Image: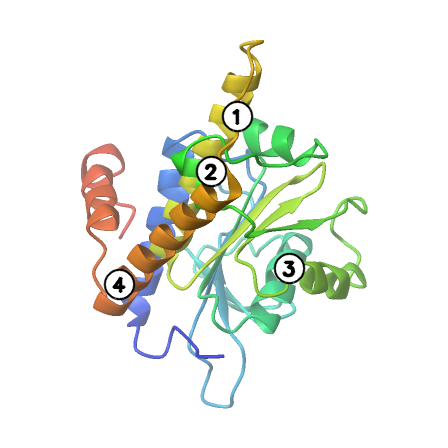
């Protein structure tokens, strides 16, 4: 599979990842100092696999481009500007996904109330609206095995994920992969809206209208084609707008 980091300047990757942390915090989708957003760096001169991760103990709204930590596939620290290390155990899921899916530049994991709620019901995400239709028949599931510290779980998680870019970790949260940081963040925000909308709709006590499979599939393909065009162009207007938001809401994230 292609490596999407090949032509991406490292400074831009660091900026985008710091922006991802800040945006997730602004949307109230963080969980104290827990969960991670990781980004794959180009391999080192000796072929070493390298990834960017948040410093241990910092809130998402404290992450900057300069204090991101570089780790290898095991979570061992290679470069630590902040000096606090990382939560290596928390990188277990991310390392497994990155090593199996070289097309994934960014892996984003959240524990939002809405995401955890939908992950905790057998039916999962329903195609109730345009947001959720983009994920129609494109969601993987992984059963809960306890806090993700067991390295043996990685093989099962990767097998369950397969070639899909969205996974509900049952009774735990959600995982999204992106060919860029921008793609992962926007997909996660749409997934979060989908989960919130589903909870709101089902909470009304009325009869939900689930989209027919053919309509949901058509909509999902429309999203995919649009995302492919954006990825191929190298320019994402929605991401640019999000970065402009941060210039006012979180100045200094890119320092």
Which circle marks residue 229 in the picture?
Answer: 4
Which residue has dot 2 on it?
Answer: 132
The first of marks 3 and 1 along the sequence is 3
Is any atom of residue 64 visible in this view?
A: no
Residue for point 61% across, 72% down: 100
Is any atom of residue 47 visible in this view?
A: yes
Which residue has dot 1 on it?
Answer: 198
Real-space Cα distance between discs 4 and 1?
Answer: 29 Å
Label 1's element? helix
How far from the left and from the top, in percent, is residue 208?
A: 54, 20
Q: Nearer the viewer, mark 4 or mark 3?
A: 4
The first of marks 4 and 3 along the sequence is 3
Q: Nearer the viewer, residue 53 or 159?
A: 159
How far from the left and from the top, in percent, is residue 141?
A: 68, 49
Q: Quadrant of residue 235?
A: bottom left
Residue for point 41% across, 39% down: 190
Q: Nearer the viewer, residue 53 or 203?
A: 203
**236 left or right of 118?**
left
The answer to the question of whether label 4 and label 3 lie on touching residues, with beta carbons closer than 8 A, is: no
Label 3's element? helix
Which residue has dot 3 on it?
Answer: 161
In the depicted structure, whether residue 6 falls above or below residue 55: below
The answer to the question of whether label 3 and label 1 lie on touching residues, with beta carbons closer than 8 A, is: no
The answer to the question of whether label 2 and label 1 lie on touching residues, with beta carbons closer than 8 A, is: yes
Real-space Cα distance between discs 2 and 3?
Answer: 19 Å
């Amino acid at each position: 599979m292609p490596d999407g980091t090949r032509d991406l300047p490292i400074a831009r990757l660091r900026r985008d990842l710091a922006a991802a942390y800040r945006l997730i915090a602004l949307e109230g989708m963080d969980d104290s100092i827990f969960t991670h957003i990781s980004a794959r760096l180009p391999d080192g001169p000796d072929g070493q696999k390298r990834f960017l991760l948040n410093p241990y103990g910092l809130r998402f709204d404290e992450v900057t481009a300069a204090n991101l930590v570089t780790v290898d596939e095991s979570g061992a620290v290679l470069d630590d500007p902040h000096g606090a290390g990382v939560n290596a155990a928390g990188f277990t899921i991310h390392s497994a996904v990155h090593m199996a899916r070289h097309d994934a530049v960014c892996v984003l994991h959240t524990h939002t109330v809405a995401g955890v709620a939908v992950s905790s019901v057998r039916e999962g995400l329903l195609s109730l609206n345009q947001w959720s239709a983009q994920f129609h028949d494109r969601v993987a599931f992984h059963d809960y095995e306890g806090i993700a510290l067991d390295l043996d779980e990685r093989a099962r998680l990767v097998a369950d994920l397969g070639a899909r870019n969205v996974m509900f970790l049952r009774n735990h949260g959600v995982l999204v992969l992106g060919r860029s940081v921008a793609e992962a963040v926007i997909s996660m925000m749409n997934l979060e809206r989908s989960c919130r909308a589903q909870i709101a709709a089902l909470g009304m006590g009325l009869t939900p209208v689930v989209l027919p499979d053919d309509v949901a599939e058509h909509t999902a393909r429309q999203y995919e084609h649009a995302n492919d065009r954006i990825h191929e162009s190298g320019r994402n207007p929605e991401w640019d707008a999000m970065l402009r938001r941060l210039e006012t809401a979180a100045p200094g994230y890119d320092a």
